[in-house]
Image: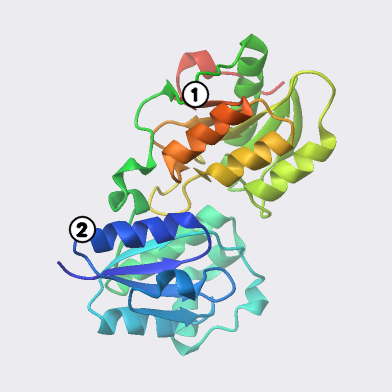
Amino acid sequence: MPPLGMIVGGGLLPQRAAAAAAAAGRVPHVVVLEGFGEPRDYAAYPHIVCRLGAAGRMLEWLRAAGARDLVLAGRVSRPSFFALRPDAGAARMLPRIGMRAFGGDDSLLTAVLRVLREEGFNPMEAYAVLEDLLVRDPTALTTHLPDEDARRDIRRGLAVVRALGAVDVGQGAVVQQGLVLAVEAIEGTDAMLARAGTLRREGPGGVLVKILKPGQDRRVDLPTIGPDTVANAAAAGLRGIAIEANGTIIVDRAATAAAAEAAGLFLLAIDPSHEAWSETIS
């Protein structure tokens, strides 16, 4: 099989994707983003380490390896545009990205994917390599279930995240007793949960809601949770997590569900478009 190109940041998701590709007989060629991914995690595969602005070097190396299918996965904190220090190849691509470089993450990533296709690559979803990453249908993944108060908080969280996503800001929110404790912006889910923990009210804990932005390209930056998310949600005093069925990645589903069960949290995959979850912001 042809090699699989990967550009990876931090976390378990790209490691699992690389292992799954290798197990399927497809050698992953991995570009580890400096300061985000750990090169030692990819020691078993051909890999190089590149700073984020060295797009020219990345694509040249992947092209020489014969890797045309390309997976982008892992945690990356978006730097200042002026901190990128683009190499010659990246500088050549920047005019094609244009003002989208100064927009939200989805706007930028959509432009990046278009440029990658123009460069001869085929960007792929991480879940094309790891089929068990998505919960395909609405279901409860724990024996703990939300009561009606928690379901109202989920509905409120969905309305808030839809509004955020419409302006390309974030994919998550924490709601407790109808109050929005935190919304996800550039800091990411873990930092949002830490902030929510400092703002929690007395009484029943809040909920974390993670869904796709409206119209989001599904090949990159899908909402993602894992065992660390559960641990951080529990530390913040939450009582449950609601994610989008067929739209939110769960890294190590068994471990994530087990962690939620042990912590007494519900973990619920829902269809946000179902009428049961509709609410308008008042």
Towards the viewer: 23 or 58: 23
Question: Residue placed farthest to the left in the image?
Answer: 1
Q: In front here: 105 or 48?
A: 48
Q: Are marks 1 and 2 in contact (CB under 8 Å)?
A: no
Q: Earlier in the sequence, mark 1 or mark 2?
A: 2
**Is 59 in front, or is 74?**
74
Where is residue 251? Give x, y as percent. 45, 46
Q: Amino acid at mark 2?
A: Ala
Residue type of the residue flagged with mark 1: Thr
- Locate residue 42: give its quadrant: bottom left
Residue 73, position as x, y percentages in the image: 44, 59
Left or right: 256 as drawn, with respect to 230: left
Q: Is residue 179 left or right of residue 58?
A: right
**Residue 34 image offset from top left, x and y in percent:** 55, 76
* Residue 63 quadrant: bottom left
Q: Quadrant of the C terminus?
A: top right
Residue plotted at (20% across, 58% down): 24
Residue bearing mark 2:
24
* Residue 119 vertical position relative to residue 109 in the rendered view, above or below: below
Coloration mode: rainbow
Q: Which mark is residue 131?
A: none
Mark 2 neighbour class, 10 Å CA radius: few under 14, some 14 to 19, many 20 or more: few
Q: Quadrant of residue 241?
A: top right
Q: Is residue 241 visible?
A: no
- Residue 37 horizontal/vertical position (percent): 52, 69
Residue under pointer 1: 142
At 47% from the left edge and 56% from the top edge, which residue is drawn?
12
User: Which element carries disc 2, helix, strand or loop?
Assistant: loop
- Residue sticking out furthest to the top: 148
Q: Residues within 10 Å of mark 1 (few under 14, many from 20)?
A: some
**Inter-mark Cα distance, 1 to 2:** 31 Å
Residue at horizontal 56 percent and vertical 56 percent from the top: 105
